Amino acid sequence: MSKRLILVFILSSVSLLGLMTFYIYERDYNKENNEVNQHYFKMKNTINEISLECLKARAITYNNYDKLNQLVFTLETLSLIGLSNDENQKNLQNVSEKKRLKKDIDIYINNVNQFLRYLSGIKNSYILLTTLNDKLLSSDINQKYKKDFLQSVYYFTKAIILNDTLYIEKAHKYLDKLNIKSVDQKDVKILSAFFIHTKFLSDNYKTFQEYYFKVIDKDILNELSTRKNELDITLNKNLYFLNLLTAFIFLLFLISFIIIIYLLLKSSRENLRLILMKEHIDYSYYHDSLTLLR
């Protein structure tokens, strides 16, 4: 009987240890899950702020990019923290998801940096074009091509303000009529500068616009949501299997506990029976079975 009790006791102790292990894992899981949610929330807010700052940078001619650069740095730092501080490195799927997210973030940051690089050149050319426009209006430039220059400046300006490359195509209808070799010598300097900046806008505005929409459309938020959902699925799947295992361990513990109670009761009854038997034997030993006298 004692061997059975020892075996059942060991079984129940192992079950209890399993339950304690699950409690610790679930506590760590909840902690990690909260940290992941907070981390992704910070990344999402940072991306929204970057998008807003890019809109402001696009709309305002003279704008300081310090805040935008700081936000980009913050986003890059968050993506690195999300990978390096992974508390579940044993789960390769989690690490893989975070690496994919880091790659997506890197692409987004590159789009923002390219947007700013092109924006600086676009703004510079836009400012100089408006300055040239004022000079053209007040100059005594030859009237036979003055109108074509002014119209092309008008359409380039409209393209930048409305963010529509269609107006650049319209501007070229007037630019195509012009030739630097055909202008008067006194107008060569101002018109050479004009051609340099219109060429820059023609060659780069479409690329600038592509980066602009990549930043503003915030496709990265969809990627962020996808990576977050995939990570949640992985974590929840692990927790689901652990719950099943814990239910089994708890059942084992319950069965062990019931067996222990049963064996203790049985042992108690057996002890009581032995005591009564001993008393009966002792009584029979000291008393005559017929007269019941000593």
Image: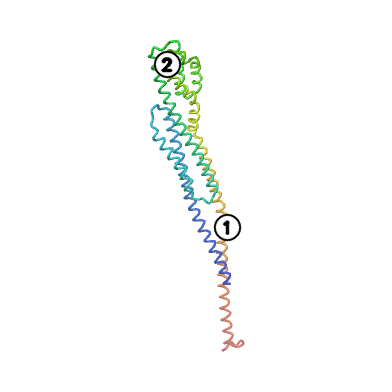
Q: Which amino acid type corresponds to the residue marked 1 in the rendered image?
A: Phe
The colour scheme used here is: rainbow
Q: Secondary structure at mark 1?
A: helix
| Residue 63 in which image quadrant | top left
Q: Residue at x 57, y 57 (%)?
A: 248
Instruction: Please tell me whether residue 169 is drawn above or below residue 289 in the rendered image.
Output: above
Which residue lies under the disc numbered 1?
248
Can you give x and y, in whole percent of width and height, for residue 151 in the image? 45, 16
In space, the residues marked 1 and 2 are separated at their CA atoms by: 89 Å
Can you give x and y, in whole percent of width and height, for residue 99 in the image? 52, 44
Q: Residue at x 46, y 39 (%)?
A: 44
Q: Nearer the viewer, residue 181 or 29?
A: 181
Q: Quadrant of the N terminus?
A: bottom right
Question: Which labelled disc corresponds to residue 175?
Answer: none
Which residue lies under the disc numbered 2?
188
Instruction: Give the class, few, some or many, for how many residues have Cα within 10 Å of label 2's Cα (few <14, many ≥20).
Output: some
State which mark lies toward you, 1 or 2. 2
Pointers 1 and 2 in contact (C-beta within 8 Å): no
| Residue 272 in which image quadrant | bottom right
Q: Which amino acid type corresponds to the residue marked 2 in the rendered image?
A: Val
Q: Is residue 260 left or right of residue 72?
A: right
Q: Secondary structure at mark 2?
A: helix
Can you give x and y, in whole percent of width and height, for residue 76 in the image? 45, 40
Q: Is residue 230 left or right of residue 112?
A: right
Can you give x and y, in whole percent of width and height, for residue 129 in the image? 42, 21
Q: Nearer the viewer, residue 286 or 27?
A: 27
